[in-house]
Amino acid sequence: MSKQKLTPVSNRHVSFWGRNNTWFLLIGSLITLASCNSTDSKLPILGQREAVTKTVDGKSVTDSVYQSVPDFKFVSQYGDTVTAKTLDNKIYVADFFFTTCPTICPKMKVQLKRVYEKFKGNPDVMLLSHTIDPAHDSVSVLKEFAQNLGVTGRQWLFVTGDREKIYDIGQNSYMVTAQADSTAPGGVVHSGAFILVDKAKHIRGIYDGTTETGVDKLMTDMNRLLAEYKP
């Protein structure tokens, strides 16, 4: 897949996905369709899937392999390396933001703080916030930002790294908007989505992270997802 050249975040403004209603409706349709096809109360697995045929006990068996978040390497607010392995055996919520964003990011962080407080101390849950402005959002800036939010410990990590890799994982793995747009303030559009990921790195839900209703739904679905792993 060809990658789009992205414009740097120059004046640190952002546009929400109001201009991306078609995308949002498409995701909503996919979630509804997957839910309708579900035979139990489990959350659907979103994204592409591939039919794989293998031999089991001498018989040919076709199974579905679902899209998953690939390995990555970023740096946290503590200056250490964060990879996909850091989140092994966890469900987690991912989002994209930047610390100087004056529009949707403050709303998102208020809502994600609710999630943090609700699941604080739960060893099966993590939060992962990716900055889309790594040129400004250094390790020290992210650490101060986390501290100002009242975030301690390693349950909620704020990560920075190579800008192109951050945009790539947003668009191609988490299925959220992160692209150049010359009509948007700062030349960049990113979504206000929160993405729920299971322990197998499959995407299980995408939610509006700017509203209380959207995040209430996220927290309900997090409990549903955690229940899947109970004996």
Image: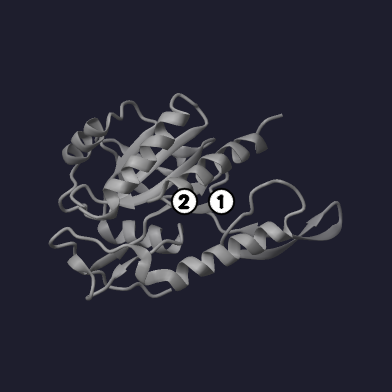
Q: Which colour assignment does the render follow?
A: one colour
User: How many numbered discs?
Assistant: 2
**Camera-nearest label, 1 or 2:** 2
Depth check: give the residue in front, 128 or 219.
Answer: 219
Tell me if residue 76 comes above or below residue 28 in the rendering.
above
Residue at mark 1: 202
Density class for disc 2 (Cα within 10 Å; few <14, some 14-19, many ≥20) is: many
Q: Quadrant of the N terminus?
A: bottom left
Q: Name which quarter of the figure residue 36 lies in.
A: bottom right
Q: Which amino acid does the dot numbered 1 rest on?
A: His
What is the C-alpha distance between the residues marked 1 and 2? Answer: 10 Å
The image shows residue 221 at horizontal and vertical percentages of 57, 43
**Label 1 Cα crowd, 10 Å radius (few <14 / some 14-19 / many 20+):** many
Q: Is residue 144 visible?
A: yes
Picture layout, residue 117 above or below residue 221: above
- Of the numbered discs 1 and 2, the one sitting upstream in the chain is 2
Q: Which residue is at 46% across, 38% downward? A: 87
Q: Secondary structure at mark 1?
A: loop
Amino acid at circle 2? Ile
Measuring from the top left, give residue 83's x and y in whole percent. Answer: 40, 43
Residue that mark 2 sits on: 195
* Residue 118 falls left or right of residue 33: left
Residue at point 18% right, 62% down?
9
* Quadrant of the rendered image containing residue 38: bottom right
| Residue 133 rendering spot, x and y as whole percentages | 22, 54
